[in-house]
């Protein structure tokens, strides 16, 4: 869509973070539904770390992403022989009708200007009765301790920047509605969380966001909103929070599994 812009960009720090995600921490809700005979589409696959894990549970996987950089990394690191990667838009998949049994996406719909349209295009390539499984963070659920006012400011700025880029950062709570409007049925909505509580986890998470908010894709948009002066204090606050011995950060992901109707 012309009016959407990926908030995080594809800077190395972002891609490196995405590459740490695994099928266990990002697709656990889907694993019981997978079988070795299935064909799976991973749309918005990024650098392919989850895609590679999914390949161990099904017959074939196609990973699709609109970023040539991300697909290049996924192809470079590909080890499983049953995985193929394509550069393509989820709004216009270069794939035939009724060609996949399962379609999966992690942290994708929150960045789209029209998630219902994307899900409708995914429905096209699913077989009748095929499953869609989507998981997205809900930034409105993010909580931290001890409290830092600057991190509240960060969360407010993030909401403004993400929505200004055409996305919806509180996507987790909206997944079921988007899936329903895209024509799916048998909708099951659940949730799970990520947390950062050990010193190592806190430092990794804090450094990630201290770096991300300085990247041009985020900082330039914040400047457009008149919020550039907040970036430095927020980055410092992240690192101070990480050093807190009682530091704690957590947030919810919405998860939905639904099926394409058996009949049109």
Image (cartoon, grey):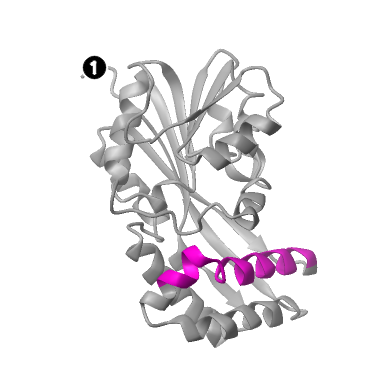
Q: Nearer the viewer, residue 194 or 187?
A: 194
Report helix, strand or loop for mark 1.
loop
Residue at screen point 74% across, 81% down:
244
Taking depth in this image into account, of 198 and 21 the one nearest to the observer is: 21
Most foreground residue, 113 or 103:
113
Q: Give the labeled residue for mark 1.
A: 263
Residue 132 is left or right of residue 150, and the answer is left
> Residue, x 35% and y 37% (percent of image)?
187
Segment colored magenta: 200-221
Q: Residue at x 41, y 60 (%)?
A: 169
Say whether residue 260 is magenta.
no
Answer few, some or many: residues within 10 Å of disc 1's Cα (few below 14, many 20 plus, some between 14 and 19).
Answer: few
In x, y percent, where is residue 232?
58, 83
Residue 48 in view, yes or no: no
In this view, the residue farthest toward the left is: 264
Residue in the foreground of this view, choosing between 214 and 166: 214
């Amino acid at each position: 869509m012309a009016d959407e812009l990926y908030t995080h960009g594809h800077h190395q720090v972002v891609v490196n973070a995405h590459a740490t995600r695994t099928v266990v921490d990002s697709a656990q809700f889907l694993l019981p539904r997978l079988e070795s005979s299935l064909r799976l589409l991973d749309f918005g696959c990024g650098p392919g770390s989850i895609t590679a894990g999914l390949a161990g549970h099904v017959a074939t996987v196609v990973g699709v992403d609109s970023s040539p950089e991300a697909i290049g990394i996924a192809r470079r690191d590909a080890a499983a022989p049953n995985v193929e990667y394509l550069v393509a838009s989820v709004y216009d998949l270069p794939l035939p009708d009724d060609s996949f049994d399962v379609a999966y996406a992690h942290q994708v719909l929150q960045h789209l200007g029209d998630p219902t349209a994307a899900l409708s295009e995914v429905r096209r390539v699913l077989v009748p009765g095929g499953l869609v499984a989507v998981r997205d963070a809900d930034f409105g659920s993010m909580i931290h301790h001890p409290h830092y006012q600057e991190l509240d400011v960060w969360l407010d700025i993030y909401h403004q920047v993400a929505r200004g880029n055409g996305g919806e950062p509180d996507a987790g709570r909206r997944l079921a509605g988007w899936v329903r409007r895209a024509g799916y049925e048998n909708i099951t909505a659940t949730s799970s969380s990520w947390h950062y509580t050990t010193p190592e986890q806190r430092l990794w998470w804090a450094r990630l966001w201290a770096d991300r908010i300085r990247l041009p894709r985020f900082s330039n948009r914040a400047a457009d909103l008149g919020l550039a002066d907040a970036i430095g204090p927020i980055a410092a606050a992240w690192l101070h929070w990480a050093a807190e011995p009682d530091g704690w950060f957590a947030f919810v992901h919405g998860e939905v599994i639904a099926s394409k109707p058996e009949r049109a």
